[in-house]
Image (cartoon, rainbow, N blue to C red):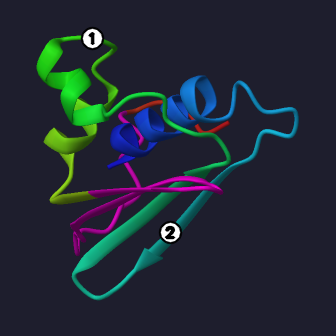
Amino acid sequence: MLLAVGEAVNNAITHGSASRQDPTVTIESLREPDVLLFCVSDSGRWTRDSVQSRRAGRGGLGLSIIHDLTRDVDIRRNRLGTNVIMRSVASSARVSKLPSMGMPSV
């Protein structure tokens, strides 16, 4: 999910807000019991349709990566900018302290 959010942020900076005098990129997140939800928003406007661009092979792989790594992607455009909403299954795994592997603590 981290890679998908990073791709959405990169797209927002590169394509969404680059032409604005006051560029804004916002990242919001929400965790529900079984779903992670991230929304990356920018203040720019799209100049072409993303689905059509992917079919024609133009542009980078950002949207393809986002679609491949998340359960659901919703891209919403309006006069204020673009929102990329990504949903993924929340993991119940916890990060535990890694063993020291014989290395001294710093």
Q: Spatial distance from mark 2 to mark 1, Cα to Cα?
A: 30 Å
Amino acid at the residue labelled 1: Arg
Using the image, determine if residue 55 lies above or below residue 35.
above
Amino acid at the residue labelled 2: Ser
Q: Which mark is residue 29?
A: 2
Q: Are marks 2 and 1 in contact (CB under 8 Å)?
A: no
Q: How many marks?
A: 2
Using the image, determine if residue 1 lies above or below residue 87.
above
Q: Could you classify mark 1 by the number of other residues whose Cα lies within 10 Å: few (under 14), some (14-19), or many (20 or more)?
A: few
Which residue lies at the image location 24% right of the left edge and 71% below the top edge? 90
The residue mark sitting in front, 2 or 1, is 1
User: Which one is in front, 105 or 67?
Assistant: 67
Q: Could you classify mark 2 by the number of other residues whose Cα lies within 10 Å: few (under 14), some (14-19), or many (20 or more)?
A: few
| Residue 81 shown in magenta | yes
Which residue lies at the image location 32% right of the left edge and 49% below the top edge? 1
Using the image, determine if residue 80 lies above or below residue 17.
below
95 left or right, relative to 21:
left
Q: Secondary structure at mark 2?
A: strand
Q: Which comes before the other along the chain, label 2 or label 1? A: 2
Which residue lies at the image location 37% right of the left edge and 48% below the top edge? 98
Q: Secondary structure at mark 1?
A: loop
Residue 26 lies in what quarter of the image? bottom right
Residue located beneath label 1 in the image: 58
Highlighted magenta segment, given as a residue range: 74-101
x then y, percent, for residue 11: 49, 31
x then y, percent, for residue 69: 19, 44
